[in-house]
Image (spheres, grey):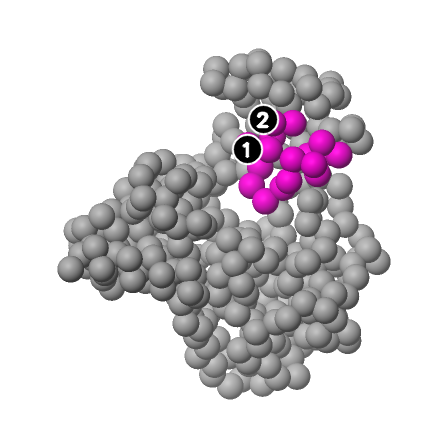
Amino acid sequence: MTEHLSTDVIENASELGVDDSDVLEFFPTPEDRNQRLDKYLAANIADMSRSWIQRLIDDGNVTVDGIRRSQTFKMTPGQIVQVHLPPIAPDELLPEDIPLEIVYEDNDIIAINKPVGMVVHPAPGHRSGTLVNALLHYDPAISMAGTARPGIVHRLDRDTSGLIVVARNDRGRLSLLDQWADRSVRKEYLAITTGAPPDVVFNIDVPIGRDPKQRNRMAAIASGKSAQSRVDVLESFGVAALVSVTIATGRTHQIRVHLAYAGFPVMGDRVYNRHHGPYGGEGSLAERQMLHAFRLGLHSADGRDLDLSVPLPPDMEAVLASLRHAAT
């Protein structure tokens, strides 16, 4: 293994579970005028409760134009809001007896079917109930590797279900990091989109970076990092479609951003899907983003080929059943 591998991977692949910044920036718009600071941030930061945001404000971790403000401070367009996320020390992590659906395991790695709603690693607002907490209970000997994210080399959003593979020891971690760095892992997702793409197969090659106006969001932006996705339409319903997305890269929110850019956002995605109605984003018949990590093709630390897959979860099956029924 190369000495520089882990640094290069961390700096260039946001899917590896390392945030690219400990500070989030937000820029209030005219629509946010006179909104309370805590309410404004709660509406703009995914996966963080309002109570935790209020605690960050009270602890002085939130500034407006460089000045600490109270929860009730009113927003004005043109301000710059910064949220400083406090780090979590490894010794704060506690094992929790949380059931895990193990898909595959050997001495070096564990593959898990992550349920909807489970956060991968502790973060502000989610210091317990995470996949890491469950892993520490399932395998107390798992390598901490000096971080608060033991075993984690890639991640899934809280509301994305499906396959995630973690390392049990240094050999497993280095093997996985090598495979993610050289892009030899086959990563296939299933998604239900709003609208049906006219092409059965198409590629999206558009760079992705932080949205300059909402730093907790990603965007298709020329200054971003290269990102490539292949989309195969499996079923078309006119108002929606079931698609398979294979990603060559692994940028934060890549599939959600790419599909939205193509005009067919993920159904139920409250961040990137601006369509309204039963098949859109907010208020749709999908209670979360209809995105599932379906298949991983990789090899074990001792060189064996692994082709792992997990079925669609019940909520996505239910949405598909409704779409099929409406199409008949």
Say which quarter of the image contains residue 54: top right
Q: Residue at x 49, y 61 (%)?
A: 161
Residue 315: x percent and y percent?
42, 60
Q: Is mark 2 on a helix, strand or loop?
A: helix
Q: Name the residue under label 1.
A: 44
Quick check: 52 above or below 236? Answer: above
In the rendered image, residue 42 lying in the magenta stretch gets the answer: yes
The residue at 65%/79% (across/down) is 108
Q: Which of 107 and 304 is in front in this view?
A: 107
> Residue placed farthest to the right in the image?
91
Magenta-tinted stretch: 38-56
Between marks 2 and 1, how big is the CA–CA gap?
A: 6 Å
- What kind of element bears circle 1? helix
Q: How many neighbours does mark 1 have within 10 angstroms: few (below 14), some (14-19), or many (20 or more)?
A: some
Res 207 visible: no
Label number found at residue 40: 2
Is 326 in the magenta?
no
Horizontal arrangement in the rendering, residue 51 relative to residue 10 (left or right): right
Q: In this view, does 297 lie above or below 282?
A: below
Vertically, is 204 above or below 186? Answer: above
